[in-house]
Structures are given as structure tokens and as C-alpha cells.
């Protein structure tokens, strides 16, 4: 388990890419569960446990649809397991850091907002890094796709949750 966390950390630090992960359904299930649990905890702290569960479920479904569509459009379907595993595992890891920041800065909301904003930017950079490797494209393509995904998820969650 430590080696797996280290591998996700190396992806978050841009030392490795999704191609360094095995294409394993079991590993995807583990990373996906990690993504869902950490996302639910963070979103639950911010907007309530039921809303958090709804938001993380919707975001997970959108992630799956986005990655499948993006990889299929570039004829890279064979990279689905590794790409989703990398995206969910790294997001779970960064969300765990965000939960710790949330707890440690509870008395300092301005500092919390700065820390969470910086973590969000880091997460976007990691998503771009993973997507560029998965698609064998340049960094600009990865950044553009990460931005499209990020803003689409935020917009759809706002529509579904009624502005929460």
C-alpha cells in the first residue's frame, strides 16, 4: 500500500505518469473508492453529508464519461484503466491533503481558502499532466482539457445542486 501511495505522490509531483500504473480493474476500484470517500468527506464538511455524497457521485460519473469520451476521440481506449486509476488516486491523495488543511485551518478561514485554492490549482496541473500522458499530447492540450473538465463539473454541479 505504501508503494501505491508513493506512486500516486510521484504522479502528483510530475515525476511519473499514468503509464507507470498497471492496467488493473482491482487497482481502479481501490483508487476509485479512495476518491469517493475522500471527496465525500471534504464535500461533506463544506456542504453537508448528503450534498457531499451527491456531489462526489455526480463528479465521479462525469469523470468517467469525460475520460472515456476523451480517450475514445483520440483512439486511446486501451489507456482507460490506467488513466482513471491515476486521476482518482491522485485526486484522492490531494483531497486527503485538503481535508487536513480544512481541519488545521478551521479557525483561520482566509488561510483555509488560500490553501484550498492552491490545492485546486495543483489538482488541475496534475489532471493536465495525466491527460497529456494518456493522450500522448503536449502540455497545452492537457491544460486545455483539464480546464474544460474542471469548469464543466463546476457548472453541472451548480445546476444540479441549485447553486450550493
Image (cartoon, grey):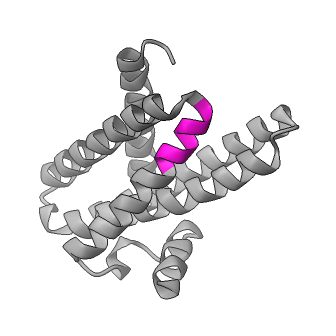
Q: In this view, does 111 lie above or below 67?
A: above
Assess whether residue 14 is covered by the magenta stretch: no
103 sits left or right of 25 in the view: right
Residue drawn 54% across the image and 37% down it: 44
Residue drawn 54% across the image and 46% down it: 41
- Which stretch appears magenta? 39-46
Residue drawn 43% across the image and 61% down it: 34
Q: In this view, does 55 lie above or below 14?
A: above
Q: Is residue 134 above or below residue 47?
A: below
**Furthest residue toward bottom:** 3
18 sits left or right of 47 in the view: left
Determine which quarter of the picture holds residue 132: bottom left
Residue drawn 21% across the image and 63% down it: 80
**Furthest residue toward right:** 108
Q: Which of 114 and 92 is in front in this view?
A: 92
Q: Nearer the viewer, residue 42 or 60?
A: 42
Q: Position of residue 74 (x, y in %)?
A: 17, 54
Q: Taking the image as drawn, is residue 113 in sight?
A: yes
Q: Position of residue 87 (x, y in %)?
A: 39, 59
Secondary structure mostly seen in the magenta stretch: helix
**Furthest residue toward top:** 162
Q: Taking the image as drawn, is residue 138 in sight?
A: no
Determine which quarter of the picture holds residue 146: top left
Q: Position of residue 75 (x, y in %)?
A: 12, 58
Q: In this view, does 118 lie above or below 150?
A: below
Determine which quarter of the picture holds residue 66: top left
Q: Position of residue 31 (x, y in %)?
A: 37, 66
Q: How many marks?
A: 0
Amino acid at each position: 500500500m505504501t508503494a501505491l501511495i508513493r506512486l500516486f505522490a510521484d504522479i502528483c509531483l510530475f515525476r511519473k505518469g499514468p503509464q507507470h500504473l498497471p492496467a488493473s480493474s482491482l487497482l481502479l476500484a481501490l483508487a476509485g473508492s479512495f476518491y469517493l470517500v475522500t471527496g465525500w468527506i471534504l464535500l461533506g464538511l463544506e456542504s453537508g453529508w448528503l450534498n457531499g455524497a451527491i456531489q462526489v457521485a455526480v463528479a465521479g460519473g462525469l469523470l468517467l464519461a469525460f475520460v472515456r469520451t476523451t480517450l475514445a476521440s483520440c483512439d486511446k481506449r486501451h489507456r482507460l484503466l490506467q488513466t482513471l486509476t491515476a486521476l482518482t488516486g491522485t485526486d484522492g491523495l490531494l483531497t486527503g491533503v485538503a481535508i487536513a488543511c480544512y481541519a488545521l485551518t478551521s479557525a483561520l478561514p482566509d488561510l483555509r481558502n488560500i490553501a484550498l485554492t492552491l490545492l485546486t490549482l495543483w489538482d488541475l496541473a496534475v489532471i493536465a499532466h495525466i491527460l497529456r500522458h494518456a493522450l500522448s499530447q503536449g502540455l497545452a492540450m492537457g491544460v486545455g482539457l483539464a480546464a474544460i473538465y474542471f469548469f464543466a463539473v463546476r457548472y453541472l454541479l451548480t445546476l444540479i445542486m441549485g447553486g450550493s
